[in-house]
Amino acid sequence: MKPKILISDRINDKGIEILNKVSDTDIITGLNEEDLIKKIPAYDALIVRSETKVTKAIIDAGSNLKVIGRAGVGVDNIDIQSATSKGIAVVNSPTGNTIAAAEHAFALMLSLSRRIPEANQTMKEGKWNRSSFMGAQIQDKTLGVIGLGKVGVEVVKRANAFGMKILGYDPYISNELANSLSVNLVELEEIYKNSDFITLHIPLLESTKGLIGLNELKKMKPTTQIINAARGGLIDEDALYEALANNIISGAAVDVFVDEPTQNQKLVDLPNLVSTPHLGASTSEAQVEVALEVVQEVLDVLDGKFAKSTVNLPFLPDEAQKVLTPYFKTAEILGEIITQLSEGQFKSLKIIYNGDLSQYDTNTLKSSVLVGLLNASSDEKVNIISAPFIAQNRGLHIIEEKNPSSDLFSSVLSLELTTETGQFSISGVNIENETHIVKVNDKSLDFTPYTPYLLFIENLDRPGTIGKVGTVAGEYDINIAFMTVGRNAPRDTAIMIVGIDDAPNTEVIESMRKIKNIVSVKGVSLNIS
């Protein structure tokens, strides 16, 4: 019997043609929640865009529903938790607009460098001002690419074709892949100082919000031009306005804004800003690709296959689920922490499953680690299904080790991340569905990372050091939720973990680094939802 599929928001006809060959497909748009609740019990799959809100009530009514497909990237209109609890896969189409987004970023750069929008407007006004629009060639110029995921790599390919020199920042791709793309991997500071053009291709997270502010803009050359076709909020809009209005940088091109539709008209009105209303995915070809991708994902699920763009967890056998499921979040937290503690270019990641964890298929645990590791750096939607593919595409070297014995706990999950600057390690356990970090590098300790921000402070174990850290936090109105210390011997080196409620700014970090006996201070942000 053919599966029954309901499409409640219109997708491209090419996707529908494929579905019609292998399923009984109905296209019924404009349905409200009540209508969908009545209709959904008859269907095995539901495909939506952004218009349909797939609520808990609709999911509960879907007695035969096996998969919900989102033609596009965002799944905010789908109750993921309810779908997961019902064993319903949720899939999307995250790569269908890759080329469109890359081309739009490149088009913005060319428009900016050759002042095309301004010149076009004067032509429409009946003017012929050739001398007023002197531009710049991009050949032999240096392009700084922040984020080398799918879109970033496509931008690099086009920049190579134009004869540009490319600096790249992305700690999570291999040197081999970078070399094959003719990308010189550097730190952000070098990109700011040496790039003629800078383009961003990273996700908007707490750690990347306002990544480029006034301080970063002031480090750039006065001739630098910056492009953001990724996410609104990566560049501080007030800082960008000041930099453009005062000729701190030459120009900017923006397709995305903090609030959309944007109300920041003073920024849009600047003569050295090129702006578009979030058109990165707005091509007919992208809409075809998005439809084809989500259709294939839905059909894969209905055929009992793994869909690479599944955004929720697959189910495990009962015995394995009992042991492994609590560790999914623990694994993600460990990945989140170690990626923010590390420095330098990524070389390899070793995942060690100790005790009971070693007795089962740990692919899902590995994926959960990679979700935490990659989420802060990828412009793709990272989940436990897609994470291994993304890691493989980036040339990451993953080593897994299973150790049936565990001294203190029934299970321990450990990570060892090796970079060009050294090795970083962390271990965690899950006790009654609560993550406990029990080791950081060579220091044993025990804390639960329940706050959105953590400070990892390496210090010499000397009287008064803890108090001085608390004093600095108080001076900056930073509320401390907990503090714990790990050390190997009195008055030796130690590590202090401080859980805080507020994001520490650069000034707070620098003030703590100046405290006597403090070796290093690193801030870590966590997705604690």
Image (cartoon, rainbow, N blue to C red):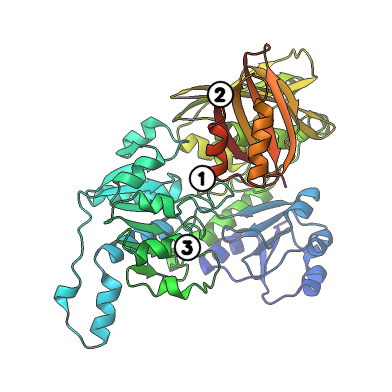
Disc 2 target residue: 424
Q: Earlier in the sequence, mark 1 or mark 2?
A: 1
* Residue 278, horizontal then vertical, whole percent: 47, 67
Q: Secondary structure at mark 2?
A: strand
User: Marks 1 and 3: in contact by CB < 8 Å?
Assistant: no
| In front of the other: 401 or 272 | 272
Please name which of the two marks, 1 or 2, marks the residue nearer to the observer.
2
The residue at which mark 3 appears reads as 237
**Where on the picture, by quarter, is residue 388?**
top right
Q: Which mark is residue 378?
A: 1
Q: Quadrant of residue 73?
A: bottom right
Please tell me how crowded label 2 is: few (under 14), some (14-19), or many (20+) other residues with Cα within 10 Å.
some
Question: Are the residues flagged by discs 1 and 2 in contact, CB closer than 8 Å?
Answer: no
Report the Cα–Cα distance between label 3 and label 1: 22 Å
Q: Nearer the viewer, residue 2 or 321?
A: 321
Whole-angstrom CA distance, mark 1 to mark 2, is 21 Å
Amino acid type at mark 3: Glu
Q: Residue at x 65, y 49 (%)?
A: 311
Can residue 369 be seen at all in this image of the molecule? no
Left or right, residue 328 beside residue 279: right
The structure residue drawn at horizontal position 77% and vertical position 12%, both measured from the top left corner, is: 407
Residue 143 against residue 17 in the figure, above or below: above
Coordinates of residue 111 in the picture (x, y in percent)? 29, 66
166 sits left or right of 450 in the view: left
Q: Which mark is residue 253?
A: none
Residue 263: where, in percent of width, then height? 52, 74
Report how far apart the C-alphas of labels 2 and 3 lie in the structure. 35 Å
- Which numbered disc, 3 or 1, marks the residue closer to the eye? 3
Q: How many marks?
A: 3
